[in-house]
Image (spheres, rainbow, N blue to C red):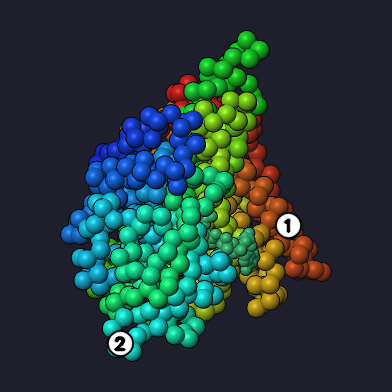
Amino acid sequence: MKETPVADVFIPEEFTEEQKMILHTVQDFMVKEVHSMGFGKVASLDAEKDKDLVLSVFKKAGALGLCGVSIDEEYGGMGLDFNTGLLFTEGLAGGFSFATTIGCQTSIGSLPILWYGTEAQKVKYLPEIATGEKGCSYCLTEPGAGSDANSGKTRAVLNTEGTHYILNGQKMWITNGGFAEVFTVFAKIDNDEKLSAFIVEKGFGGIELGKEEKKMGIKASSTVQVFFHDCKIPKENLLGERGKGFNMALNILNSGRIKIAAGGVGGMKNGLDKIVEYTNQRIQFNQPISQFGAMKLKLGIIATNAFAIESGVYRVGADVDKKHAELKASGSSYNDAKINSMREYAIECAILKIQGSEAMCSTGDEAIQMFGGMGYSQETGVEMAYRDARITKIYEGTNEINRMLSLGEFYKRAFVTKELNLKAAAKTVPAAIAQNYNPFNTGFLATEFEFVNNLKALFMIITGAAGNKLKTKLVDEQEIVMNLADILAMAFISESAFLRVKKLSQKTDIDKTELDVKTKMAKLYLYDALDVARKSANNAVDSFSGGIEKMVLKCLLRRMLRTYRINPKDMRRDVADHIINKGGYKF
Ligand SMILES: Cc1cc2nc3c(=O)[nH]c(=O)nc-3n(C[C@H](O)[C@H](O)[C@H](O)COP(=O)(O)OP(=O)(O)OC[C@H]3O[C@@H](n4cnc5c(N)ncnc54)[C@H](O)[C@@H]3O)c2cc1C
């Protein structure tokens, strides 16, 4: 299998001081404006009752420029590149519900106009969105159209004068809907099969808002139903081309998905800081509870997930920026370059969303466990983090839909657009396996890179075999698709973690202790990833194959994902001790 050259991989340690300033600015903002209220108070905020307070924090963020991070300077924003935008999103995580509010404004709320709008639309709407003077929202979901988003019933009909679209219908679960002035609404024109998109101002009239939803978490974040009753939209507010709204909606979600992963990284790091602070001072059996192996096990797992997922997130973020620059250099328009650079990484965005959200949710759960009874109290903010994190597995495409999407996109590229040459890749597999089993291979982390290559090769082999066997029926065998998507994720994230460590090891100014801890985290991630992949691969193979084919696949599986000989307990203890001694996840 082809190995990505480290020179082509961006690692978080390469962020500049300027980029880190953005992170620190948003983190400081959250501490000053949100944490200062006290976690008990933040946990009991209510989007309906506390609307003024929520809006005042939002307006302050706007005044500081935090609502315009992705918007170009010519339209009043900061014009950050995509990867710095991800770093900003990592910093937002400390804001709990406010992270969703500002996250929506800077992402799904405004990007449709930025990426698909005409110059006139951008000039008209973006400056006030960038400053937070106008809140914005993204209206795709309907009561009958959730995961099946293209099945919505909201309709737009051009009036007889041909000047306005008349919009009727209902949207549901609309973040920021309670105070937004600008809505990107996805609706079908006449009897079109595909959605179109419109920029709708609250001032157009014919808009009715439902009450704020009572939710499990992100309680201060506004979430309402939006009803359109003969809402009159000027014809020029059609966004992008007629019938292209669904593609647009999905592509905006690609960006939203990797941002959820970046937020997850922030959430896990914040969680670690809080856990270390608490478990270092909480004494039981005459010692700080952080000194117990059971606690170190959990700390080691959370840190490892944060490290590995972070490696994938910023690797992809930089790749999106590189692709954008390449496309622009080759003559693409601004909009096309934004759209196509994002679309190119749809698979990675889906994978990272799934793994980032799941790791963050389990961090929230374990944080409560490590705080014991205090974790269950509103006072510490830990139960709020747990509740707030849960939505990330649902919105921007549920994790099931994202698993199917990552595989679907992979097959599309392999068999429809033929961007991926699966046959050529398959031919390299036997050689790769033979080469991998070289006991004299003493290259840098040779065993680990061998496992990473094996994960990639095994994914290709099993996915190819399942595709061959089931052909178009594979879409109905979702259990197998779920398994395959998990092998793909384990391969990609493990690879990202080891490429990061390899690149770090080539730097002359790297602190050796830090490199050692990071190498251990990459190894620990791989150790667990091999378990996930083994289980998923066994499940898939047992589900679709039989006879000789099954025997061969099982034999390959055992060989390629053989036991990885490390001592996970000792390694996790070392990682945990480092974090405990540093007082948190401080790298
Ligand atoms: C707090 C919150 C904020 C939100 N913000 C916004 C927003 O700003 N704008 C917006 O447009 N939407 C928003 N949403 C909507 C969100 O994107 C949807 O809830 C989500 O896409 C899932 O749709 P659904 O709730 O209808 O669930 P369903 O689609 O009914 O799914 C229910 C379950 O069935 C599974 N399922 C569905 N279809 C399939 C399938 N084909 N195969 C296998 N399993 C399947 C799902 O994975 C899930 O487990 C928000 C939702 C919430 C809760």
Instruction: Tell me if 431 is positioned left or right of 24 in this view.
Output: right
- Disc 2 residue type (three-letter): Gly
Instruction: Tell me if 454 is positioned left or right of 479 in this view.
Output: left
* Residue found at x 22% / y 66%: 124
* Residue found at x 25% / y 63%: 125
Question: Badge 1: how crowded within 10 Å, few (<14), some, or many (20+)?
Answer: some
Residue 574 in percent (x, y) is at 55, 27
Distance, label 2 to label 1, CA atoms, is 59 Å
Q: Above or below — where is 380 with respect to 241?
A: above
Q: Comparing marks 2 and 1, which lies closer to the viewer?
A: 2
Pick the quarter of the image with the C terminus: top left
Mark 2 close to ligand 1, CB under 8 Å: no
Residue indicated by mark 2: 162
Among all residues in the image, which is located at the extreme bottom? 160
Q: Toward the viewer: 411 or 398? A: 398
The reply to whether residue 194 is visible in this rendering is yes
* Residue found at x 47% / y 43%: 46
In which quadrant of this rendering is ligand 1 seen?
Answer: bottom right
Residue indicated by mark 1: 538
Give residue 176's quadrant in the image.
bottom left
- Disc 1 residue type (three-letter): Asn
Of the two numbered discs 2 and 1 on the same chain, state the one appearing first in sequence.
Answer: 2
Q: Above or below — where is 339 with respect to 505?
A: below
Q: Toward the viewer: 200 or 281? A: 200
Which dot marks residue 376? none
Instruction: Tell me if 285 is positioned left or right of 418 in this view.
Output: right
* Residue found at x 37% / y 54%: 179
Among all residues in the image, which is located at the extreme right? 547
